[in-house]
Image (spheres, rainbow, N blue to C red):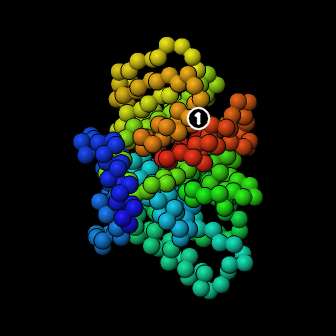
């Protein structure tokens, strides 16, 4: 705990978060954060259940990483007026009366947590039996956003891609990989900008998604261009009032995006590499971000 407090103090000093302007995203995410880290939700009024306009699907297990992923999924659902669908996957060899009871209690606890901090979000959950990545991908066919946690260690990838990387690589819609190695951060995290990495081959839907995400969050958008030429300036607010800052990166785009990820609320990148196609593995930039970024990563296109 002492180490966590020291890291939080250093983060506050580095970014001056005490004076950061609040955003809509910050107002929502800060419900989940406190000066002492995560707290269990207090009992409150029964949640309100509006009819959702879309669905966020999130993979759930008992790890701290999963709690963080569920929190981010719930925030996205509230910002967009969508519902939240949780899936907990058990292997067939784990089946027992005790494991079924533990799975039910886990989903109930996660549901109570979401309702305590984001009461307007409609929540459903189910337990599936089998392999996590294929089941999540199958259930994601009608989801508007899929959220998975990343565990920040090599053991999950010793024999191939982790579950998070498999889902991020093979899902055809937007995916959010929640990797925040120093979570929970200070309260200024919600005021950070959104960053999108682009080059001459970036699909237009990547920038469209980033602009829409910045609009619903109420934050600024930094467009990081990889290439050569004059450094673009600051644009006036565009559609939805989003202020866009364009920056040129003449060097390695991976290094630039990784550096920016330490000061961003999230990074948006295209899923495929040059010549990539649906169902292909992640491109070099997107895979580097999933494995090494210091903030959540959206993969689009």
> Quick check: 237 above or below 261?
above
Image quadrant of residue 211?
Answer: top left
> Quick check: 283 above or below 47?
above
Does residue 10 appear left or right of residue 163 in this picture?
left
Does residue 45 appear left or right of residue 184 in this picture?
left
Q: Quadrant of the C terminus?
A: top right
* Number of marks present in the image shown: 1
Q: Residue at x 35, y 21 (%)?
A: 236
In front here: 261 or 269?
Answer: 261
In front here: 81 or 154?
Answer: 154
Q: Position of residue 259 (x, y in %)?
A: 49, 37
Q: Residue at x 50, y 22 (%)?
A: 248
In this view, the residue farthest toward the top is: 230
In this view, the residue farthest toward the left is: 19
> Quick check: 131 above or below 239?
below
Q: Residues within 10 Å of mark 1 (few under 14, many from 20)?
A: many
Does residue 128 appear left or right of residue 209 in this picture?
right
Image quadrant of residue 2?
Answer: bottom left
Q: Quadrant of the N terminus?
A: bottom left
Q: Position of residue 275 (x, y in %)?
A: 73, 30
Q: Which residue is mark 1?
A: 254
Secondary structure of the residue carrying numbered label 1? helix
Q: Residue at x 53, y 45 (%)?
A: 293
Residue 79 visible in the snapshot: yes
Residue 119 visible in the snapshot: no
Q: Position of residue 209 (x, y in %)?
A: 51, 36
Q: Position of residue 139 (x, y in %)?
A: 63, 57
Q: Residue at x 49, y 13 (%)?
A: 230
């Amino acid at each position: 705990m002492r180490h966590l407090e020291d890291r939080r103090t250093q983060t506050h000093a580095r970014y001056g978060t005490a004076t950061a302007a609040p955003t809509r995203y910050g107002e929502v995410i800060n419900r989940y954060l406190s000066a002492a880290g995560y707290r269990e939700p207090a009992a409150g009024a029964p949640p309100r259940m509006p009819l959702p306009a879309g669905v966020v699907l999130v993979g759930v297990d008992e790890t701290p990483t999963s709690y963080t992923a569920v929190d981010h999924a719930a925030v996205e659902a509230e910002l967009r007026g969508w519902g939240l669908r949780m899936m907990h996957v058990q292997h067939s060899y784990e089946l027992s009366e005790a494991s079924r009871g533990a799975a039910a209690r886990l989903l109930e606890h996660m549901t109570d947590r979401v309702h305590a901090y984001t009461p307007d979000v409609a929540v459903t959950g189910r337990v599936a039996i089998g392999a996590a990545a294929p089941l999540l991908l199958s259930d994601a066919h009608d989801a508007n956003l899929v959220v998975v946690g990343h565990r920040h260690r090599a053991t999950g990838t010793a024999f191939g891609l982790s579950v998070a990387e498999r889902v991020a690589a093979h899902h055809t819609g937007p995916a959010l990989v929640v990797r925040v190695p120093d979570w929970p951060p200070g309260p200024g995290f919600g005021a950070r900008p959104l960053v999108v990495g682009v080059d001459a081959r970036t699909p237009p839907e990547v920038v469209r998604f980033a602009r829409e995400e910045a609009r619903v969050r109420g934050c600024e958008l930094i467009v990081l261009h990889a290439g050569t030429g004059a450094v673009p300036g600051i644009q006036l607010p565009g559609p939805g009032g989003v202020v866009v800052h364009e920056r040129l990166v003449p060097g390695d785009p991976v290094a630039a995006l990784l550096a920016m990820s330490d000061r961003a609320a999230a990074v948006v990148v295209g899923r495929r590499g040059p010549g990539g196609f649906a169902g292909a593995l992640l491109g070099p930039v997107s895979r580097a971000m999933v494995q090494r970024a210091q903030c959540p990563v959206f993969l689009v296109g």
